Amino acid sequence: MGPLITFYALALLAIVSAAITAFSRNIVHSAFALFGALAGVAGIYVLLGADFLFIIQIFIYIGGILVVTIFAVMLTQGIADVNVSNRAVGVLPALVTAGVAGGVMFYAIIHSSWYHARPGSATPTTYWIGDAFLGPYVLPFEVASLVLLAALIGAIVISRQEVRE
Amino acid sequence: MTPLNLTTIDFSWLAILPLIALSVGAIVVMLAGTRVDDEDSAALGFIVLVALLAAFLLTMFELGQNTAAFRGSLAVDDYAVFFEVIIIIATALTVAMSLEYAADAGLAGAEYYALVAFAALGMLLMAAAGDLIIIFLGLETMSIAVYALAGFIRRDAKSNEAAIKYFLLGAFSTGFLLYGIALLYGATGSVRLTAIHASIAARTAVNPLLLLGLGMLLIGFGFKVAAVPFHMWTPDAYEGAPTPITAFMAVAVKLAAFAGFLRIFFTSLDPLATEWSPVLWALAVLSMTAGNVIALVQSNIKRMLAYSAIAHAGYALVGMAAANGREAGGAVLYYLLAYAFTSLGAFGVVVALDRGAESHAQIDDYRGLARDHPGLAAAMAVCLLSLTGVPPLAGFVAKFYVFAAALNAGFTGLVIIAVLNSVVSAYYYVGVIVAMYMREGGVAVESMSRRPGLLISIAVGVAGVIALGIYPQPYMGAAVNAFASALGRPALHAVSMLP
């Protein structure tokens, strides 16, 4: 019973925070609400016994990306004045689309036979993740660095000042 | 703790040497770029061409292997080689037509050529992918590089618009693809294509989760191959991107997406063919019809060719929808091969009229081209006739094979719609030919003798169109053989398919 209550509490935290992020008119509020969404997901990782993912979620998403996002929001002059946060447009078509998509997903999730991983006590996963990265999944692991290199070069191209002669 | 067992890696130089050649080439270009001015960037292009040649030769060693490496992460089969060879040729021609273009337009050469090499690397990964993670990583490597390339002309608002639209919609579609991959993993417990196939084939009842994942994958790939209704980004991205990159997007990107698309759907999800075949039927009809009808009213040749590319994705989907295994699969592969050469030749001519700063991409600009540049006009005419499907050019044979395969599978209605669409498409393709040969007053085109790279790429494209059209048997044989290797079945002779 305990884990179930914890799960719903964490899920509620994540969903409500995500809704605030999406619907808030103020981008500063959106940025801060993102913290709850990311932390809620991190909590769910703990419930699943995924200790490594939990730490990474905290380090990378909350400690890194979220902090940089908040810095960017705060350092951008007058960002609170120009309601740049998402203005809702096309509410009705969006509701229909989201409703249909959500309904289909809900149906599929309820009626599916899920693949169940072997249940077991929560043990440290870091060793096995490292083993998988350097064993069966060594190629995806290495290729990911090439994706990042391409992204870095692309970001430089896009953000560089055009030199005018 | 046990020490790391290196034998579990299943390491294979053979499978990754072409990839290593390209990534080394890209890094060398970046390093050398610090010493090379943007006006002399053609030298950097030659480095990429050398890397591509090395990758091509190394790929040849994979022929006839039909194994897997890295515990199934990479497939080393003729199917991968077939697509890798076309992708390498398409990339080489893109680089060749960029040699003068990038230098004249003052584009940042090092980043330009490095990103082209990285995009090609991602495409090779998609062609050889044996699991969904590699497909995703290959797709991302390719897409991220091409997003940046589409917006490479920084001063041009249209180029910026192209990059933004392509990036936002592309990232959105990648989300769908990733969600589909996650759901497939949830339903089958594996990301390896062979294991997914085994898991689905072992089931009796259809799992709704699986169908949802299948739908998400369809949306993701539909975006990448620019099938209607997922095509909205195509005309704007094609119009605004630097023209050689437009050719790259229309040919290499589309082929790589089809390589992953076909492999997943024919080797992993084929037990669900009765579910996905009708969806592809609808996508094929929509793509062909919308692409051809909207192309009729375009006045910009890049937009026209964009809608034409959408329509041709539809023709390829006709073969996929037929879904009767080797025959249809081989026909689709041959179709993509023919489309690659035809499209590269046509875009080469568009590059010839385009001079970076002032883009002469209106169809009106092509008036009277035959008088001043009979060679260019003839090349364009050959490619456009091949796109229409006029014998004896590559496009005709390709359409013949695809339509024959679909007819054999009992898709008579679909083939009738496809043939009607081909007739409609003749109108806008021939319109350009009429402008070139029978009208007066286009733009003056810079002499081709000053642009050998572009000249060679157009010549290779046109030569491919004619060779594939006049003597299709060996290439069709290779396509059927390649497809059979992906299915893990012995090669067979393509005799039954010959006209």
Image (cartoon, helix red, strand yellow):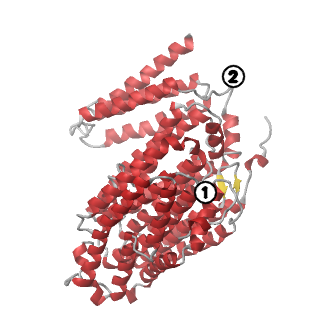
Residue visible at 79% across and 41% down? B3
- In depth, the one of B99 and B458 nearer the eye is B458
Q: Are the residues under marks 1 and 2 on the same chain? A: no
Pinpoint residue B67: horizontal percent, then vertical percent: 71, 56
Report the Cα–Cα distance between label 1 and label 2.
Answer: 36 Å
Residue located beneath label 1 in the image: B128
Q: Secondary structure at mark 2?
A: loop
**To which residue does mark 2 refer?**
A120
Give the residue displayed 43% in from the left and 54% down from the top.
B412
Give B18 or B428, whichever is nearer the viewer.
B428
Residue depth check, mark 1 versus mark 2: number of the one nearer the observer: 1
Identified at 27% across, 72% down, the residue is B361
Residue B393 in which image quadrant:
bottom left
Q: Is residue A153 visible?
A: yes
Give residue A1's position: percent from left, percent from top: 56, 10
* Residue type at the position of mark 2: Gly
The subunit carrying tag 2 is A
Label 1 crowd bin: few (<14), some (14–19), many (20+), radius 10 Å:
many
Work out whether residue A138 or residue B238 is closer to the camera in this orientation and state it.
Answer: B238
**Quadrant of res B385:** bottom left
Furthest residue toward left: B441
User: Is B332 drawn above or below residue B71 in the view shown?
Assistant: below
The x, y position of residue B75, in whole percent, is 65, 55
